[in-house]
Image: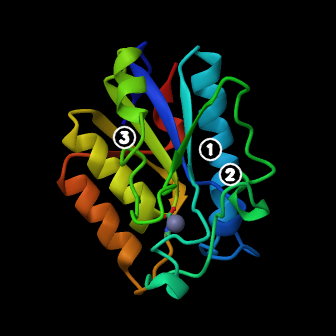
């Protein structure tokens, strides 16, 4: 499937942070493998003058998603911590928009739209189609894609640039099925025409 980029498109890179990569606090298997394809998308979008957004999980020490606070996850992506940094090889452009999420102690925020100004930033720029990749397929990518669909965006899932946590063996596959069922369109980098 060929997709031609237009002035109403934006790239959203979800949570490509050290803690979600091998060696991190909440490693996604092969999480670092999304970096290379995402760099291709970043080049395509930046080169075409289109906006690039990068979300990051940005938790306070007392965040409810942590096991010690009653949640299900190990401590990860602490605000200003090493683990919250983007992967060193991710080539975000200098004018990328950074969207912090999950920064309030009492709220989990898997979606980049939840408790952020992402929607208003996109609307300000007239964006109608979003291209979403990153980590993890079965959590923050899924919720960002579904959030975008609910807000009326056309959503492309960058299937060559996502990886799943797979707490249960097929969570990633199921997440992809759900996103497609709800209207997302799966593409790979080779599908994009500039
Ligand atoms: C995520 C688990 C906990 C994600 C964030 O970015 O997918 N997963 N916090
Ligand atoms: Zn988190």
The answer to whether the residue labelled 3 contacts the one labelled 2, judged by CB atoms less than 8 Å apart, is: no
Q: Name the residue under label 3.
A: 156
Q: Earlier in the sequence, mark 1 or mark 3?
A: 1
Q: Residue at x 20, y 43 (%)?
A: 150
Mark 3, ligand 1, within 8 Å: the answer is no
Q: In this view, does 116 lie to the left or right of 83?
A: left
Q: Residue at x 42, y 34 (%)?
A: 118
Q: What is the CA distance from the residue labelled 1 to the residue labelled 2? A: 5 Å
- Expressed as whole percent of the image width and height from the top left, the position of residue 126 reads 35, 15
The answer to whether the residue labelled 1 contacts the one labelled 2, judged by CB atoms less than 8 Å apart, is: yes
Rendered image quadrant of residue 16: bottom right
Say the numbered circle drawn on residue 38.
Answer: 1
Location of the N terminus by quadrant is top left
Q: What is the CA distance from the residue labelled 3 to the residue labelled 2? A: 18 Å
Mark 1, ligand 1, within 8 Å: the answer is no
Q: Mark 2 points at which residue?
A: 35
| Camera-nearest residue between 59 and 9 | 59
Q: How crowded is mark 2: few (under 14 residues within 10 Å), some or many (20 or more)?
A: many
Q: What is the CA distance from the residue labelled 1 to the residue labelled 3? A: 14 Å
Image vertical order of residue 55 relative to residue 17, above or below? above
| Picture colour scheme | rainbow
């Amino acid at each position: 499937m060929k997709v031609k980029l237009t002035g109403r498109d934006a790239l959203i890179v979800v949570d490509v942070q050290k803690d979600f990569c091998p060696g991190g606090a909440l490693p996604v298997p092969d999480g670092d493998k999304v970096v290379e394809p995402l760099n291709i998308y970043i080049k395509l979008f930046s080169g075409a003058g289109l906006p690039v957004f990068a979300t990051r999980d940005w938790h306070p020490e007392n965040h409810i998603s942590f096991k010690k606070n009653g949640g299900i996850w190990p401590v990860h992506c602490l605000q200003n911590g090493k683990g919250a940094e983007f992967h060193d090889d991710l080539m975000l452009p200098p004018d990328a928009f950074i969207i912090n999420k999950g920064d309030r102690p009492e709220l989990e925020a898997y979606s980049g739209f939840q408790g952020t100004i992402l929607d208003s930033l996109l609307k300000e720029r007239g964006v109608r189609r979003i291209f979403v990749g990153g980590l993890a397929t079965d959590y923050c990518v899924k919720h960002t894609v579904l959030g975008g669909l609910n807000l009326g965006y056309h959503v492309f899932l960058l299937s060559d640039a996502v990886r799943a946590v797979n707490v249960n063996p097929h969570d990633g596959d199921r997440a992809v099925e759900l996103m497609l069922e709800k209207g997302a369109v799966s593409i790979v980098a080779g599908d994009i025409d500039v």
